[in-house]
Image (spheres, rainbow, N blue to C red):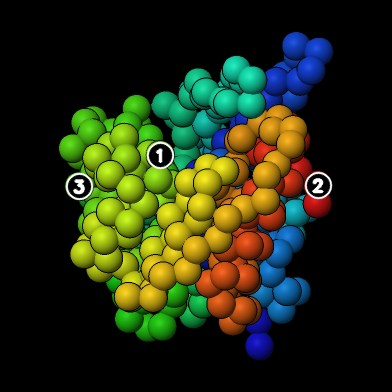
Amino acid sequence: MTKRFVSIGECMVEMAPQPDGTYAMGFAGDTFNTAWYARTCLPAAWQVDYLTAVGRDAVSDRMVAFMRKAGIDTTHVARLDGRTVGLYLIELQGAERSFSYWRGASAARALADDPARLEAALTGADVAYFSGITLAILEPEARTRLAQALTRARLAGTIVAFDPNLRPKLWPSEQAMCTAVTQAAGLADIVLPSFEDEARHFGDADPMATVTRYQAAGAKVVVVKDGAGEVLCAEGTALTRHNPAPVAPVVDTTAAGDSFNAGFLATWLAGQGALAAMAAGSALAGRVIGARGALIAL
């Protein structure tokens, strides 16, 4: 039978810098990037769905067509009047990136406004994946609706995976971000944080401190990414470590964590265990950071 991986969040117009100084237009966004790479990594028996909202304008049409061409199911992409999609621009300093965003009229901010649509998308899902950015773009009431829908899905057997993806500029305060992310981790079976962000905003002294904190919040499995450093996976008291192979040259680190999550989850869901899953995630991320932009052909 077909299995379903449902990724929840916002896909945006991406303006990515090119070697000649121009910008190339594409479509990307953290949870969409993971869905895109998951579609490549998962067997054909899996269906990858994207749960979001877009407008009814031409750029929204192009975005939905892009999703379908990539093999991502768009049944749960709502089309909303009077809205459009967000846009971000990548700026590179070496291989490190920074972003400028335009998302005031983004339809994805309303992705959790319809409880019935949430229920339809998550009913029967084998995996539901969301991020801290998914939470950040929602109003508090919508955030509560999403949490309730994920809780019901998890009780029905859905595996819930969460990347904290800490972006303080999207929140009214750092404290609001940290509180919401901690609560969301309690809804998840698998939490996939990045240590650099966790250290900066939660004050974690080392990756093990990140593990301990998210386990205390309720996560069953915690996978801590650390850039080019060691990846740590904790399943209860069992710890597995993986040292990724060096990557050279590093061209653009956009979507490094998103692609790692896709490779990890696809391998984990195949039952191959933590070490194989971390190696697969690291290998995929290594390929992605060797090229420009969030989505690369594999």
Q: Amino acid at mark 1?
A: Glu
Residue at 81 percent of width and 51 percent of height: 298
Q: CA distance from mark 3 to mark 2?
A: 37 Å
Left or right: 67 in relation to 206? right
Label 2 CA crowd tier, 10 Å (few <14, some 14–19, many 20+): few
Q: Amino acid at mark 3?
A: Thr
Which mark is in front, 1 or 2? 1
Label 1 CA crowd tier, 10 Å (few <14, some 14–19, many 20+): some
Q: Which residue is mark 1?
A: 196
The answer to whether the residues at label 1 and label 3 have Cβ atoms under 8 Å apart is no
Which one is nearer the viewer's eye here, 220 or 174? 220
Locate residue 281, reporting x and y percent.
62, 58
Q: Secondary structure at mark 2?
A: loop
Residue at 70 percent of width and 20 percent of height: 17
Q: Answer yes or no: is residue 113 visible.
A: no
The answer to whether the residues at label 3 and label 2 have Cβ atoms under 8 Å apart is no
**Vertical arrangement, residue 151 with respect to residue 202, above or below:** below
Q: Answer yes or no: is residue 210 visible.
A: yes
- Determine which of the numbered discs, if any, sits on residue 179 in the image: 3
Label 3 CA crowd tier, 10 Å (few <14, some 14–19, many 20+): few
Which mark is in front, 1 or 3? 1
Q: Which residue is mark 2?
A: 297
Locate residue 289, reporting x and y percent.
68, 39
Precedes in sequence: disc 1 or disc 2: 1
Residue at 38 percent of width and 39 percent of height: 197
Precedes in sequence: disc 3 or disc 2: 3
Q: Quadrant of the image for the N terminus?
A: bottom right
Quarter location, residue 178: top left
Residue at 53 percent of width and 72 percent of height: 274
Locate residue 164, reporting x and y percent.
38, 49
Precedes in sequence: disc 1 or disc 3: 3
